[in-house]
Amino acid sequence: MSEFSKRKLRIMNLLQKFIVATFIWPSLINVSIIVTAGVTYSGAFSIDKDGTKDTTVTILKASPENPSGRPGNGFKITYRWQPVAMDKDYTVFVHFVDKEGKIVLQDDHKPPTPTSRWSGKVEYIRTIPLELWQVKDKRTVCIGLPEGRYSIYAGLYHKNEGRKALNIGPGVVEAKDRQYKIGILNIDANAPVPEPGEKTLDLTGYHLAFNEEFDDLSVSAWGPAGQKGTRWIAHTPWHGDFGDAMFTDPRPGFPFTVKDGFLRIEARKENGRWRSGLLSAVDPNGNGFKQKYGYFECRAKFPKGPGTWPAFWLMGLKNLKGLPGNTGPRINPEIDVVEHYGHWPWRYHYVLHQWGRGGAESKHDGKRFVVFGMEEDFHTYGVMIDKEYIILYFDGVELHREKTPESVKTPLFPLVNLALGPGWPTDRTPNPSYMYVDYIKVWKKGKNPLNKELKTRSNADS
């Protein structure tokens, strides 16, 4: 027999053994798949009796591989897969594990594209908050993770079949029970704060109509407000103060102080009772600044600690009893541009209230967003209102838009305050607590009728 024939016979024998093994053990055979980009992945497939291939999902390392976040804030992470469509939809499980092997945080979720429709390369970003406070038995409990490093394990799970075996991409480590290490989370008090995104706010064609930079403070208890009085009053003009801290008439050094162009609002416990401050641009008679449509913005830094409740908001005039026409059924709008609850340092709250008066029905619609750094630094909180849309902005980045209800097509005035509560315990609220405000500004569309600009400081310099 020739050498060529011997080689051919050996190949045929090996192929026969391969086919027999395939029918006896329909097991998974690992191969190396070279993709066009020149990256080698560890792929796998099973060969069924009919000769078809069922390619298996490959899990890749997270991006960034070692995300970081501050306690009480959070972080962003990109999950990455080299998948194929599967016969059913799986849940992604993600466990963050400490050095003792204990699961301390989870991010189990359904992927944006169901696994039954996966193809090509799948990547998506998740924002994960790091909870700091929790209320148990009407008491505030700290649940924040300590600073340190936590292993990130992920995989796929189906309620009827359990966890799915996956292939591993470069750098991924397979662990027991079909879970795969895709990175390490670093919790660090000095970790960088994630950027919110691309800025889209455009004020071209607008001019400043109201510009409070707090170089000084013009405030009285009840007014009058406006050109014949003070710029602010220290209570809600409809006599509707709220929260667990009494809004206090201004006195030297409390609750308002101004220094270096910044307003400080202080919440302090005196003789067993909390007191704090609120500013309103309109008095009970409707005097003061108000404007229909435009862009309203506040630049502020919020206090740390559970129980704090700072806010920047807008209100209509239809709940002021002394104004003409404020009788009978009517709707008064309130736009909470931002409410910040100290129990949730990472959570941005926006609410549109439509308060029914005189028998009219009330409506309320709130939204929550995950943003970071509201207690660590100054940020801008703004809302653009026109006859078509209400658009919410954080640091110039659009967070939300909705159709403008008829009730909002009316003059609105700004308020800013540091409240406490509501409903959250204040047993661990820092005493004192401070909210800092750099400015409150309002822009109006069109040319300045006075043909001059109000004194302003650009956002780039602030």
Image (cartoon, rainbow, N blue to C red):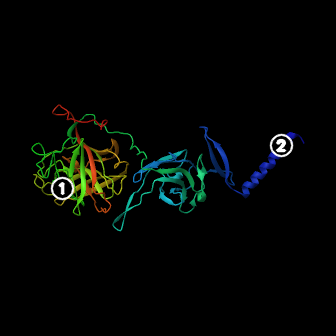
263, above or below 236, in the image: above
Q: Position of residue 258 (x, y in %)?
A: 22, 45
Identify the residue position indicated by label 1 in the image: 248
Does the rendering let one see residue 297? no
Q: Is residue 441 above or below residue 163?
A: above
| Amino acid residing under circle 2 | Arg
Q: Quadrant of the N terminus?
A: top right
* Local crowd size for mark 2, using a 10 Å CA cut-off: few (<14), some (14–19), many (≥20): few
Cα distance between the residues tagged 1 and 2: 97 Å
Can you say whether 76 is above or below 274 in the image? above
Spot occupied by residue 185 in the image (x, y as percentages of width and height): 49, 51
Q: Quick one: label 1 or label 2, which is nearer the N terminus? A: 2
Neighbours of disc 1 within 10 Å: few (<14), some (14-19), many (20+): some
| Mark 2, residue position | 7
Asked whether the beta carbons under mark 1 and mark 2 sit within 8 Å of each other, the answer is: no
Disc 1 marks a residue whose amino acid type is: Thr
Residue positioned 48% across, 59% down in the render: 104
Please tell me which residue is depicted at 59% across the width and 57% down the height of the picture. Answer: 178
Where residue 337 appears, x then y in whole percent?
28, 49
Total marks in image = 2
Question: Mark 1: which secondary structure?
Answer: loop
Q: Position of residue 42 (x, y in %)?
A: 63, 47
Identity of the residue drawn at 9% across and 44% down: 228
Residue 11 numbered mark, or none: none
**Secondary structure state at the residue bearing disc 2:** helix
**Left of 399 or right of it: where is 319?**
left
